[in-house]
Image: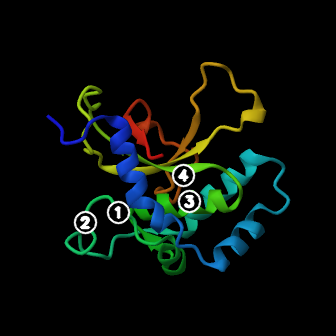
């Protein structure tokens, strides 16, 4: 049994936990977004460039003890950007903020890299954080297309936005 009413409540909980950290930007972040996206042919290329920056230039490294910063809450994105390292939730939060600075609607995502969760029991039982960018409505996606492009910026050698081992897993977009 769960202490949360439903999955939208879990989504709101994580959004409210993350949102102040996502807003903690610094002017250098906007300048980096402008530099990285200059001359990009389209929205998909802007997404790819920002994803590549976070996946390759921000190291996946946890320094803070879980007793100090446990579980789900990311650090302020300005800290991750300045220090150039963080754990999955930090890298995901940074990419969400950079995408938003580029005018792309994006959200943090909780994902369970393991067995699928019970869809009838709303629990915040996730073990990884990734990113969702809203699909471009002007692109005319197929009616059955997912509303988001999912991406995992933790792998510094990533070729794909979302590695195959995270496909077909339980995830929740925090809105």
Mark 1, other Cα within 10 Å: few <14 / some 14–19 / many ≥20: some
Labels 3 & 4 near each other (Cβ < 8 A): no
Mark 3, other Cα within 10 Å: few <14 / some 14–19 / many ≥20: many
Residue 14 vertical placement versus 53 (above, below) = above
- Check disc 2 and report the residue beneath it: 70
Instruction: Indicate the quadrant containing the N terminus: top left, top right, bottom left or bottom right.
Output: top left
- Closest to the observer, 45 or 22: 22
Q: Name the N-terminal-most of marks 3 and 4.
A: 3
Q: Name the N-terminal-most of marks 4 and 1.
A: 1
Q: CA distance from mark 3 to mark 2?
A: 20 Å
Q: Name the N-terminal-most of marks 2 and 4.
A: 2
- Check disc 1 and report the residue beneath it: 73
Q: Is residue 88 visible?
A: no
Q: Residue furthest left?
A: 1
The quarter of the picture where residue 100 lies is: bottom right
Tag 3, which secondary structure? helix
What residue sits 48% from the left and 78% below the top?
79
- Check disc 4 and report the residue beneath it: 158
Q: CA distance from mark 3 to mark 4?
A: 14 Å
- Check disc 3 and report the residue beneath it: 95
Q: CA distance from mark 3 to mark 1?
A: 15 Å
Q: CA distance from mark 2 to mark 4?
A: 26 Å
Q: Of discs 2 and 4, which sits in the foreground?
A: 2
């Amino acid at each position: 049994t769960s202490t949360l009413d439903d999955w939208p409540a879990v989504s709101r909980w994580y959004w409210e936990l993350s949102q102040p950290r996502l807003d903690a930007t610094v002017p250098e972040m906007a300048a980096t977004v402008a530099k990285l996206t200059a001359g990009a042919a389209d929205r998909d290329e802007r997404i790819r460039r920002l994803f590549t920056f976070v996946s390759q230039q921000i190291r996946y490294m946890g320094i803070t003890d879980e007793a100090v910063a446990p579980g789900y809450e990311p650090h302020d994105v300005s800290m991750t950007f300045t220090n150039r390292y963080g754990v999955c939730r930090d890298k995901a939060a940074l990419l969400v903020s950079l995408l938003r600075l580029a005018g792309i609607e994006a959200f943090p995502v909780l994902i369970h890299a393991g067995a699928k969760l019970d869809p009838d029991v709303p629990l915040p039982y996730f073990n990884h954080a990734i990113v969702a960018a809203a699909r471009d409505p002007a692109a005319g996606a197929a009616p059955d297309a997912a509303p988001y492009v999912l991406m995992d910026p933790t792998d510094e050698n990533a070729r794909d936005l979302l590695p195959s081992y995270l496909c077909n897993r339980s995830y929740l977009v925090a809105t």
